[in-house]
């Protein structure tokens, strides 16, 4: 018997009152596969992740994670939100430890792991800071560390690096790649950046607007680990250009 | 040292000016002392009541007891009810409209009735104080919990956190600033409630002191009583604010100063 896909969308549709956001959306994510979702702003990418996370029920179709229908939030799915969504009354370290029940509820091992994750995202010496003392980019990295502490089998990332400057952004993408390569698992990574998508993903899915539907589903056959040099290769640039053209068509 | 001076000097100047104006207005050729006594006689009366004969202390003790008991009781009840209300759809649909309606009604108007029900002693004052503090804090607790950033709740849910966890670690802290704003309004209202209760019927308390001074035409004692009450109001308010700064350290309090509408 083969493994079920880590994620399967079957004709998924969703509407907010007076507005169809997603319609007839179907795709699979294999175990260990990193999929980037590109799409125009307001195209329903965050809504799609909320459906997968079990935070919203689909109006039509089905969302299956590891072969079972999603009926609510699950332990094996973790999300990084588009906004940092940190608890302002908890330190960075405690925010990372939220999935474990904060410092008091966490085991010694979880605490060590939380500190290691903070260090991995470059916040080793900001563990004691409160969210008000963090920049937008730092807060977002705390959110990433929090999701990784949860250690899900399916990663959902909603433009996690959008608030970061270009340099940090690229560095964080490489940090994410490293953490993911240490333990490869299925990931749905929403982004606006073609470069970021190509740097991280095994596959790129492009959504069109109103209602959100798939217009392209392309593999990214670039060797790993990818590095800044990868972005200078002809293969990378050819793919980037192809995506860029498609994007302009979709947006027009 | 200099910072302290810069902070306290301006209000002190104002105080001196007010006292000067007061002394002038009540000096020779000014207002008669049975309408407005000068600052000096009032100070003397205060000194006598607090230090000389100490005759104010039983009244102060009585008023503080009813204020504190009523405040604590009313506040605890309001927070518990508010939590239950905010977490229950049924309560919201069936009861909340009436809470809002009662909130708008002046509760001090119930003072005579409460005195009939609970007698003329401490109990009636405590009940009146509790009733008056209850509603603003209830409404603030409910709206504070309801006002929790939905994305924070969603985030906690996405990590499979239980409803109890979400309430304790997300909603309650998120509501804390609003709850403290309600406690801030409540401490001032509590004092008003205690004094009104004593006005209506009592044989003790600072409100009684002021009331009986009116009958005796002893305007200086009235003023002394008002000053004592003002001091307690300020002290209580400052205390709550200190606790608030400690507990809700992440919040800049200014945003949450709720205007007390028709609360008392
Ligand atoms: N809570 C809501 N109520 C009503 N409409 C909503 C709600 N949330 C999102 N929408 C609408 O759904 C559509 C898709 O929103 P969504 O946030 O999923 O887009 P997105 O692709 O993530 O955009 P962006 O790239 O800007 O983050 C938008 O048109 C938005 O206005
Ligand atoms: Mg979005």
Image (tube, helix red, strand yellow):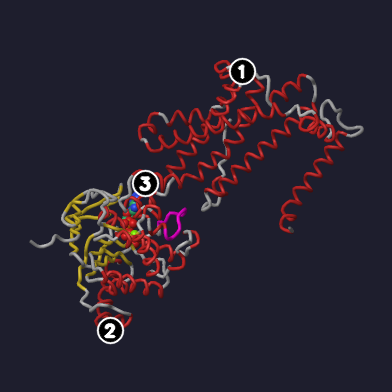
**Res B165 label:** 3
Q: Quadrant of the C terminus of chain B?
A: top right
The location of residue B56, given as percent across then percent down, is: 73, 28
Please give the chain letter of the residue carrying mark 1. B
Q: Is the residue under label 3 in contact with that under label 2 (CB below 8 Å)?
A: no
Q: Element under label 3?
A: helix
Q: Is residue B228 left or right of residue A53?
A: right
Q: Is residue A88 magenta?
A: yes
**Helix, strand or loop status at disc 1:** loop
State the SS at label 2.
loop
Using the image, tell me which numbered label, if any, was put on residue A231.
none
Magenta span dominant secondary structure: loop
Q: Residues within 10 Å of mark 1 (few under 14, many from 20)?
A: some
The earlier-in-sequence mark between 1 and 3 is 1
The disc at residue B120 is 1
Q: Chain of mark 2?
A: A
Residue A199 against residue A142 in the figure, above or below: below
Which of the 4 image quarters holds residue A151?
bottom left
Distance (Cα) linking label 1 and label 3: 45 Å
**Quadrant hosting ligand 2:** bottom left
Badges 2 and 3, same chain = no
Q: Image height check: is A173 above or below B52?
A: below
């Amino acid at each position: 018997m083969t493994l079920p896909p880590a994620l399967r969308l079957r004709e998924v549709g969703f509407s907010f009152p007076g507005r169809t956001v997603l319609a007839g959306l179907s795709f699979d994510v294999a175990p260990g596969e990193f999929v980037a979702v590109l799409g125009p702003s307001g195209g329903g990418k965050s809504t799609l992740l909320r459906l997968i996370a079990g935070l919203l029920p689909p109006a039509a179709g089905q969302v299956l994670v590891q072969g079972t229908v999603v009926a609510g939030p699950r332990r094996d799915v973790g999300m990084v939100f588009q906004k940092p969504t940190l608890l302002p009354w908890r330190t960075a370290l405690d925010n990372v430890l939220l999935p474990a029940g904060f410092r008091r509820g966490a085991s010694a091992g979880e605490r060590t792991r939380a500190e290691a994750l903070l260090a991995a995202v470059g916040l080793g010496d900001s563990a004691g800071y409160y969210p008000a003392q963090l920049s937008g980019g730092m807060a977002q990295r705390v959110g990433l560390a929090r999701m990784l502490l949860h250690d899900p089998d399916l990663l959902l990332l909603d433009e996690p690096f959008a608030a970061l400057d270009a340099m940090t952004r690229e560095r964080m993408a490489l940090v994410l790649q490293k953490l993911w390569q240490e333990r490869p698992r299925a990931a749905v990574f929403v982004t606006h950046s073609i470069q970021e998508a190509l740097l991280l993903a095994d596959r790129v899915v492009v959504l069109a607007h109103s209602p959100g539907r798939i217009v392209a589903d392309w593999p990214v056959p670039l060797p790993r680990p990818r590095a800044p040099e990868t972005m200078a290769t002809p293969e990378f640039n050819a793919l980037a250009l192809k995506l860029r053209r498609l994007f302009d068509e979709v947006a027009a | 040292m200099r910072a302290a001076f810069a902070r306290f000097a301006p209000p002190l100047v104002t105080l001196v000016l007010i006292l000067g104006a007061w002394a002038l207005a009540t000096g020779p050729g000014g207002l008669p002392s049975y309408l407005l006594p000068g600052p000096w006689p009032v100070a003397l009366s205060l000194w006598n009541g607090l230090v000389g004969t100490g005759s104010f202390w039983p009244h102060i003790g009585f008023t503080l007891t009813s204020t504190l008991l009523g405040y604590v009781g009313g506040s605890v009840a309001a927070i518990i009810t508010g939590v239950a209300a905010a977490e229950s759809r049924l309560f919201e649909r069936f009861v909340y409209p009436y809470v809002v309606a009662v909130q708008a009604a002046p509760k001090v108007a119930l003072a005579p009735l409460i005195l009939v029900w609970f007698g003329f002693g401490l109990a009636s004052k405590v009940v009146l104080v509790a009733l008056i503090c209850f509603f603003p804090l209830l409404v603030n607790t409910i709206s504070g919990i309801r006002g929790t950033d939905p994305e924070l709740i969603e985030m906690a849910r996405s990590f499979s956190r239980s409803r109890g966890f979400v309430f304790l670690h997300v909603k309650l802290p998120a509501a804390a600033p609003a709850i403290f704003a309600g406690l801030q309004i409540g401490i001032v209202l509590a004092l008003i409630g205690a004094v009104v209760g004593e006005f209506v019927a009592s044989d003790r308390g600072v409100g009684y002191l002021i009331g009986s001074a009116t009958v005796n035409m002893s305007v200086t004692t009235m003023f002394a009583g008002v000053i004592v009450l003002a001091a307690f109001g300020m002290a209580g308010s400052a205390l709550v604010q200190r606790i608030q700064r400690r507990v809700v350290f992440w919040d800049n309090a200014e945003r949450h100063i709720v205007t007390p509408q028709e609360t008392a």
